[in-house]
Image: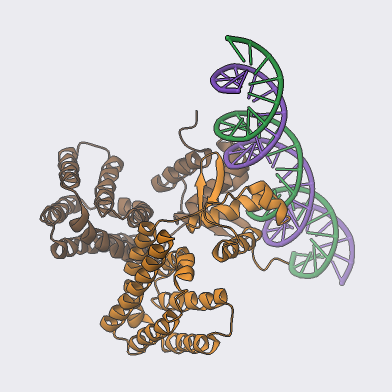
Chain colours: A orange, B brown, C green, D purple
Amino acid sequence: MNDKALPDQIADKLRRDILKGALAPGQQIKERDHATDLDVSRTPMREAIRILAKEGLVLLRPSRSPIVADPSFEEISDVIEVLTALELRSGALACQNATEEDITRIQAMQDHMDSCQGKIDRIDFFELDMEFHMAIAAASKNAVLAETHSAFVRRLWRARYLSASRKDSSDRVKRQHHDIMQAFSDRDPEVMCAKISVHLDALLENVRDKYAKESEV
Amino acid sequence: MNDKALPDQIADKLRRDILKGALAPGQQIKERDHATDLDVSRTPMREAIRILAKEGLVLLRPSRSPIVADPSFEEISDVIEVLTALELRSGALACQNATEEDITRIQAMQDHMDSCQGKIDRIDFFELDMEFHMAIAAASKNAVLAETHSAFVRRLWRARYLSASRKDSSDRVKRQHHDIMQAFSDRDPEVMCAKISVHLDALLENVRDKYAKESEV
DNA sequence: AACAGAAATTTGGTATACCAAATACGATTA
DNA sequence: TAATCGTATTTGGTATACCAAATTTCTGTT
């Protein structure tokens, strides 16, 4: 019955709700209520909330209801800074350590993303985007690095999702991905790092725009 | 009564036991037994175990007792790789963002370490060492980066502790710290990154030596 | 004696019950 | 009427009870 453990299933559901905005930033997540909603007990619900807290999506407060995180621009910017450090390192290592199979497989992932563009749910598209970046990190063959990187990608999911509202950005992202992939299959760490920097700088600027617009409303 | 939450207290105790070796690598941590040992119930014990799992000190296995992690050299090496990426970034940022007070305060920490050398417990000395590195990371003014960096420093605590048995290494570490501090007070990111690299490369080699010796026993 | 299978035990996963801190609400009084 | 104190309620923290998967042990058969 259990493809995954119950807390993970609950965390998945809550995560999607948060990212879609069904659970708004600042909103309380009362473990009792949400547990009965999902027809589970408080114990796995608690654990699911801790998982999301670890991912930065939820804020734990001592003796108070956890709330959906509402990060400031500075916090998001800090996270992007860390992600950049991790992704540059993993990109360089991937050039060095990836197998040919890794490269063709990740190339295939990218092709799949291209073909799916516009045909699938925006959230599903972001899943693919995340998987692309995470697959490159995994190709570094440093499991710890890949895992840490994944954690930060997940942590930025909502910010990415919201900041990608700009229509033109999707084409630009596609081009940046192609640049990264090109450097990767050339196994050129310098170019790859440069392209990753471009990609993540663009992300930062997109997020900055979004926050600027939000504050002027 | 509660300075900290109960799960944190339990995690602190277990963490020290693991790092000191009272809980040997590979040993099972049965939540029922350890809970009764510490006179708490399974619920906070479970949570404490999850905290340590997040820190990489404990390994969770589906439907099996968690066990104390027994990292291979490759795993430690991977962790050092990540720590390096984080520490280089935070060093460079610290050169840029640290206040003068930060620098004098961290300088004072180093002086204190020097004066304590040989006079205090090795564990306490390692606490000071960790605090030195973590203070620099905090001076980057990127809270997320500092926090992540701290997590990895803690994760390496045991390996550092075990690998520092070589008598001469302590002088060398002292010199490396001085080099880092010099570059920091000069606010010279390039030199600082170079010195940090030297320091962490030395750590990696120390750990490598220790694992080599262990395997030949 | 060796092996297969079943029953008992162990152990993590989940549900529920109980408690204490925090909050909200209402009654009482100035 | 307003302020304040006390009580009821909400809610997270903790303990315990129950369950199911996995392991071990015991037993009966070959």
Q: How many marks?
A: 0
Q: In x, y percent, where is residue B85? A: 29, 65
Q: Quadrant of the N terminus of chain A?
A: bottom right
Residue B66: image quadrant is bottom right
Residue A214, placed above or below residue B168: below
Foreground pick, D10 / D28: D10
The answer, for residue B177, to whether it is visible in the render is: yes
Foreground pick, A145 / A118: A118
Q: In x, y percent, where is residue B215? A: 36, 63
The answer, for residue B74, to whether it is visible in the render is: no
Task: Identify the residue at horizontal 23%, vertical 64% (top origin).
Answer: B201
Q: Is residue B104 left or right of residue A62?
A: left
Residue B125, placed above or below residue A210: above
Q: Is residue D18 left or right of residue B35?
A: right
Foreground pick, A90 / D18: A90
Q: In x, y percent, where is residue A126? A: 51, 75
Q: Quadrant of the C terminus of chain A?
A: bottom left
Q: In x, y percent, where is residue A172? A: 39, 83
Residue B207: image quadrant is bottom left
Task: Identify the residue at horizontal 40%, vertical 47% (top origin).
Answer: B19
Residue C13, placed above or below residue A205: above
Task: Identify the residue at horizontal 36%, vertical 53% (top origin).
Answer: B147
Foreground pick, B102 / A90: B102
Q: Is residue B96 left or right of residue A9?
A: left
